[in-house]
Amino acid sequence: MTQLSSMRQTRSRARDVKREDEVDAALNIMQGADTPTVDDSAWEDEDNLTTQSRNTTPLRQNRSGTPRKRRTKPGSSPRKQQFATPVPKPPTDEGSVATREQIANPKSSTDGVAIKEQIAKSALEGAVFTGRYLLDVVGTALFLMRKPLSVLLGLFLLSLILVQAWTTIQGAFAPLCILPGISRTAICRRNTRVADSDQQAPRWADYSRLVDVQSRTFEELLEESLGGSSLSLEIKKAEMATTDLVTLVRVSNFKSRDMLAESLVEFVDDAKKTGRGLQKLTSKIGGAVDNVMAVNDYALHAIEEAQAKAPSRFSLQSLSPWTSARRSTKEVVAETFGQAMNVLSGNMQRLILEAETSLVNLNSLEERLTTLQEMVTREDSSLSTAKEELLVELWTKLGGNRKTLRGFEKHLILLKDLNVYRKQALVHVVAALQTLQSMSEDMEDLRERVAAPDLVGSQIPVEVHMRSIRNGLERLREGRIRAKHLSEEAMYRVLGGERPED
């Protein structure tokens, strides 16, 4: 038992000495000590004299000796080795120093780094494997589908060639579409739609000229129509005064009082038609401005939408042979330009008809006044004055100066100014008619010009058209608002009131 206990103590002391030597060596390496190391082959272990004999410690021979003390071998001199390369210190917290326990167990600080590296390496290998697998699958699929893909590509190229050839054939056979038999074929279908329209379709758009014609013409019409409503009211009041005059004529001593009364009634009817015609003309001018503004706004939004949906030149959609079914931006501009011209022409024709109707009513009113003058002159030579003063003279002779009719002094003024109102209305209608006829000539010239090929007009950028439409809309809107305010002021002035403050 004593021998076994001694052996255990010897082993324990040997382990302690070995651990201390390892810790000291690690500390020297990490602190970068520049103390030269000595060749280990020049040293040998020194036996402990206090321990038992070698026969009682067999384990020391199997451990290759980690002795507690070492000495220089006889006949050898210790030789200095090269300085060891200093090993950087492991990262520690600020203000802390590596302890002997941390240095004695360096494996615990490197296990986490090794695990992370292993995980990253495994993830990279997995990603590479997945990519290679997918490439192999796709490559195999494409290899197996090479014949169907070749057929589809051939059909695509064939359809592209056929679409382009069909467009060329339609353009080449366009002159033959006027023949009775060929005009109903599919080749002439597009040309037939163009020929069926009432007006010749424009080949390119010139919104700058169109907007200029619209703005200039409607500004003049709105200015001319300012007095239309006020004149219609003045004529209406004169019409009421003439109705009272008819009553006086029926009870007069004129020999042809019945014929004179009927002529005055017809004169009242003509005055009524004239007043209504002036009101309708003013209203239709405002409606035409609203219609033109609406179609211009529609054209602007249609062009913006077509430009936003237009495929890029380098996109796959532009390579499709079926994109010809979708209208290009140029076609949309030309189509909306044609619609704007048609709307403007239609409104212009209605305005011309209405102005001519008002002109006929005014001329008829003048003829009625001339007839009345002749009839009154035959009845009483003292009334053979100018026809401008005819109704006033009648009113004066038939009771206008009596005390019982003193409440009708305004009738005398209205009858006196009736011919003045008629002349003003005549000037108003004639000016509007001349403006409309001038606009009609400008539109015909513009329509003929855009129907012919033009190298410069076809290259006008879309942005220029859009800017012209916006400017025209602003001008028409401002003119409409200004004319509305001026017309309201004229109405309040005729009615004898003041316009309320906004």
Image: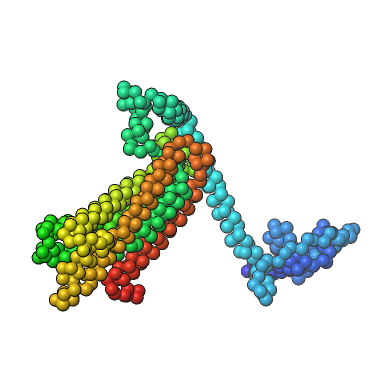
Query: Which image quadrant is residue 403 in?
Result: bottom left
**Residue appearing at x 28%, y 58% in the figure:** 278
Residue 380 to residue 341: above or below = below
- Residue 49 is situated, as x and y percent measured from the top left of the image, at 78, 69
Nearest the viewer among 289 and 235 is 235
Q: Residue 10, can we see it?
A: no
Left or right, 83 with respect to 224, comes to: right
Q: Position of residue 26 (x, y in %)?
A: 72, 66
Q: Is residue 108 visible?
A: yes
Query: Which of the 4 quarters of the picture holds residue 243?
Result: bottom left
Quadrant placement of the C terminus: bottom left
Query: In terms of depth relative to the viewer, which is nearer, 278 or 469?
Result: 278
Pick the residue in front: 31 or 390: 390
Extreme residue toward the top, this view: 181
Q: Is residue 22 left or right of residue 156?
A: right
How many callouts does the rendering have? 0
